[in-house]
């Protein structure tokens, strides 16, 4: 993996902690505070015309963000996995409420999308438990490290 200055690594760590905490807070709202809980949320999306795999993907992305970003487990790829969800959330609210946050619009999901994009670019940061593999490995341009016997 490429070497980063200490400030970038700490910035990526702080961003990782921020996004993970926001995912925890959002799941807490969805599981414990929303009247009707996950069932009401899920049925609301299905009634809006979304296929059932969409709420399943959204929950999986939110749980991945909440559980894996804070300890730093493949943070770059967890953020990348959650980005389509935030793009979809932005589209959902843009169509229904417009852009501005004051009307519950797409503004906040777009900020989340930008934060997730920054996490993808910055990488895992300091103190990550399991570092994300270099993307060039998946593109076939980087060989796996040789194992010592």
Image (cartoon, helix red, strand yellow):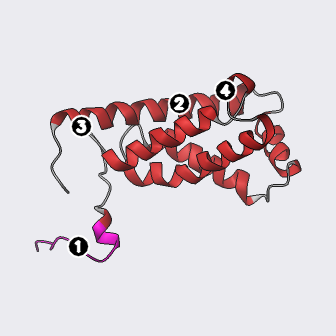
Q: Which residue was labeled with disc 2?
A: 22
Residue drawn at x 73%, y 45% is 92
Q: Residue furthest top?
A: 102
In the image, is residue 30 part of the stretch drawn in magenta?
A: no
Badge 1: few (under 14), some or many (20 or more) residues near its Cα, within 10 Å?
Answer: few
Label 4 sits on a secondary structure element that is: helix
Q: Which residue was labeled with disc 1?
A: 142
Badge 3: few (under 14), some or many (20 or more) residues near its Cα, within 10 Å?
Answer: some
Dot 4 and dot 1 residues touching (CB under 8 Å): no
In the image, is residue 144 part of the stretch drawn in magenta?
A: yes
Closer to us: 146 or 20: 20
Label 3 sits on a secondary structure element that is: helix
Badge 4: few (under 14), some or many (20 or more) residues near its Cα, within 10 Å?
Answer: few
Tell which circle, 4 or 1, labels the residue nearer the N-terminal end: 4
**Disc nearest the viewer among 4 and 1:** 4
Q: Which residue was labeled with disc 3?
A: 8
- For the stretch drawn in magenta, the main secondary structure is loop
Residue drawn at x 74%, y 25% is 103
Tell which circle, 3 or 4, labels the residue nearer the N-terminal end: 3
Q: CA distance from mark 1 to mark 3?
A: 24 Å
**Disc nearest the viewer among 3 and 4:** 4
Quarter of the image with the N terminus is: bottom left
Residue drawn at x 29%, y 33% is 11
Q: CA distance from mark 3 to mark 4?
A: 30 Å
Q: CA distance from mark 3 to mark 2?
A: 21 Å
**Disc nearest the viewer among 3 and 2:** 3
What are the residue bounds of the magenta stretch?
136-149
Dot 3 and dot 4 residues touching (CB under 8 Å): no
Q: CA distance from mark 2 to mark 1?
A: 34 Å
**Res 123 visible:** no
Q: Which residue was labeled with disc 4?
A: 101
Q: Position of residue 14 (x, y in %)?
A: 34, 30
């Amino acid at each position: 993996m490429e070497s980063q200055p200490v400030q970038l690594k700490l910035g990526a760590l702080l961003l990782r902690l921020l996004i993970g905490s926001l995912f925890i807070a959002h799941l807490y709202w969805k599981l414990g505070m929303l009247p009707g809980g996950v069932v009401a949320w899920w049925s609301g999306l299905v009634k809006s015309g979304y296929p059932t795999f969409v709420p399943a993907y959204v929950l999986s992305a939110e749980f991945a963000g909440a559980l894996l970003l804070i300890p730093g487990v493949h943070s770059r790829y967890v953020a990348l996995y959650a980005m389509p969800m935030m793009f979809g959330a932005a589209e959902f609210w843009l169509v229904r409420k417009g852009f501005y946050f004051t009307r519950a619009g797409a503004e906040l999901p777009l900020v989340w999308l930008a934060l997730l994009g920054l996490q993808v670019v910055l990488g895992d940061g300091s103190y990550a438990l399991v570092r994300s593999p270099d993307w060039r490995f998946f593109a076939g341009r980087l060989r796996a490290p040789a194992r010592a016997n």
